[in-house]
Image (tube, grey):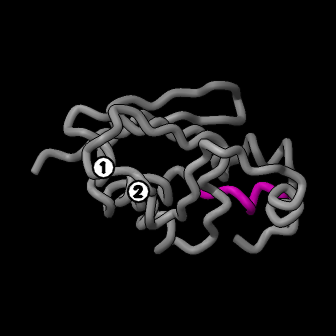
Amino acid sequence: MTELSIARARQSRHARPAELKGTFDAIPVPDKSRDAIFLLLSAHELRNPIHRVKLFKEAVRVMDDSGRLLLAEHVRDWRNFLAFGPGCLHFHSRKEWMRAATEAGLTVEYEGSITALVRWFVLRKSAP
């Protein structure tokens, strides 16, 4: 991640002993070991579309067969443009989120709004 705010956040926090460290493409937990994954207002920091797909593929790997991924993000739309101006270009469109999810083997089970500015998606593994 190249954002300066991310670098500052990493410098200011202290690791906890029980904390697992991983990367977007290598979550340090066994296959099919989680029934829920939460990506809350953070996945948009992966600027490279290939990295977003890899993150979602890792989620698919660690989710058990009945698992769900909850993605909550601002989306690039007119509401966020009114709120953030050109800053909304930092967010990804709904179409881009759906493209990455589909490519990773996920499908939308439910979609809704948390606020006028934040969307949430419940994703599950696509049928084989």
**Magenta segment includes 88:** yes
**Residue type pointed to by label 1:** Leu
Q: Residue at x 59, y 54 (%)?
A: 43
Q: Quadrant of the N terminus?
A: bottom right
**Magenta segment includes 71:** no
The relative height of residue 121 versus residue 27 in the rendered view (above or below) is: above
Determine the CA span between mark 1 and mark 2.
8 Å
Q: Main secondary structure of the magenta part?
A: helix
Residue 58, given in percent of the width and then of the height, sits at: 38, 58
Look at discs 1 and 2 and give the one toward the viewer.
2
Q: Residue at x 83, y 58 (%)?
A: 87
- Residue 56's label in the rendered image is 2
What secondary structure is marked by label 2? helix
- Residue 39's label in the rendered image is none
**Residue type pointed to by label 2:** Phe
What secondary structure is marked by label 1? strand
Residue 94, given in percent of the width and then of the height, sits at: 52, 50
Toward the viewer: 76 or 18? 18
Q: What is the quadrant of residue 35 in the picture?
A: top left
- Residue 106's label in the rendered image is 1
Image position of 96 (left or right of 34): right
Q: Which residues, given as a range, are shown in magenta? A: 86-92
Residue 45, given in percent of the width and then of the height, sits at: 67, 60
